[in-house]
Image (cartoon, grey):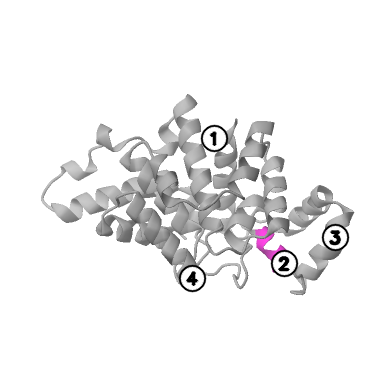
Amino acid sequence: MNASKILQQLMQQAGGSQKGSGVDVKGMLDGLSRQLGGSNNANSQGAQQGSGSSGFDLKSLLGGGAMGLLVGSKRGRKMGGKALKYGAIAGVGVLAWKAWQSSQAGKNASSQQNATPNASEGEQVDALSGEYQERRSLELLQAMIMAARADGHIDEQEQSLITEQIDALGADQEMHHWVEQQLKAPLDAQALAREADSPQAAREMYLISVAVTDEQNPMERAWLDQLASALNLPQEMVDELERQAQQAG
C-alpha cells in the first residue's frame, strides 16, 4: 500500500488550491473528461448546471481532483467558502504542532519549554519515514474520508469518482481496495481514534477532519465532537486546532 504517496499528493493539491490562481481549470476538465469517459459526460454536464440527481457539483473538482471531491462535493458548498480549509490540509503536521505549542504557552506563559520538541508527543507526519510515515498517512486518509462522509451526502457516484481520482494519483491495487472499503465502512470515531499512535497523531487526525468539514453543519459538528472525545483531546486543544484550521484556510 502506498498511503504516504497519496497523502503527500493530496497535500500538494490542497496547497495549490489554496493559492487559487494556480489551478489549471481547462487542464482539470480535460483530465476529468479523459478519466471519466463519455458515459459520464451527460451526468457531468447536468451536475455543472445544478440539475444532477446526485447533488454532485463538478465545479468542486476545480479545487484539485480528489482533494476537491473530498472537501467540496457536498450539497450547498461553494468554492472559496469557509468550509474549504485547504491550507490546514497542506500543513497539517506543522499546524497541529503549533496548536500544541500554543496550548502549552497558554498554560505557562513564563515557561520556555513550550517551544522545545517533546519526544512523548510524537513526530509530525512530514518528519516521519518508512513504515511510520505510511501508518500515519493511512490514519490521516482514513480521518479525511470519514469526515467527508459525516453529513451522509457522498453517494455512490461520488464514491466512484473519488476512487478514480485517487487511482489517478498513483494508488496501488491494495490502496484502491482500501479506499473503496473506507467509503462504505460504518463511521466509527472510537475505531478511528484507536489508530492514533501518539498525541501528535491525534491532533493531526482531528485537524485534518476539521479541514474537510463544515462546523456549522449539525451532522458534521456532531462527528467532530465524537472524534474529539474519542481522541481524548481537551477542549482547549480542540479550540486551538480549530483556530489553526481557520487561520490556515
Tag on residue 113? Answer: none
Residue topped by disc 3: 41
> Is label 3 or label 4 in front?
4
Task: Examine the image and state in which quarter residue 157 appears.
Answer: bottom right
Separation (CA) of disc 2 from disc 4: 19 Å
Residue topped by disc 4: 217
Which residue is at a point 28% across and 48% down the rendered structure image?
100
Which residue is at a point 51% across and 66% down the rendered structure image?
83
Q: What stretch is highlighted in magenta?
A: 54-62
Which residue is at a point 18% across and 56% down the rendered structure image?
106
Residue topped by disc 2: 54
Quarter the N terminus occupies: top right
What amino acid is at disc 4?
Answer: Asn
Which element is circle 4 on? loop
Separation (CA) of disc 3 from disc 4: 31 Å
Residue topped by disc 1: 4
What amino acid is at disc 3?
Answer: Asn
Mark 2 crowd level (few <14, some 14–19, many ≥20, 10 Å Cα): some
Mark 3 crowd level (few <14, some 14–19, many ≥20, 10 Å Cα): few
**Which of 233/107 is in front?**
233
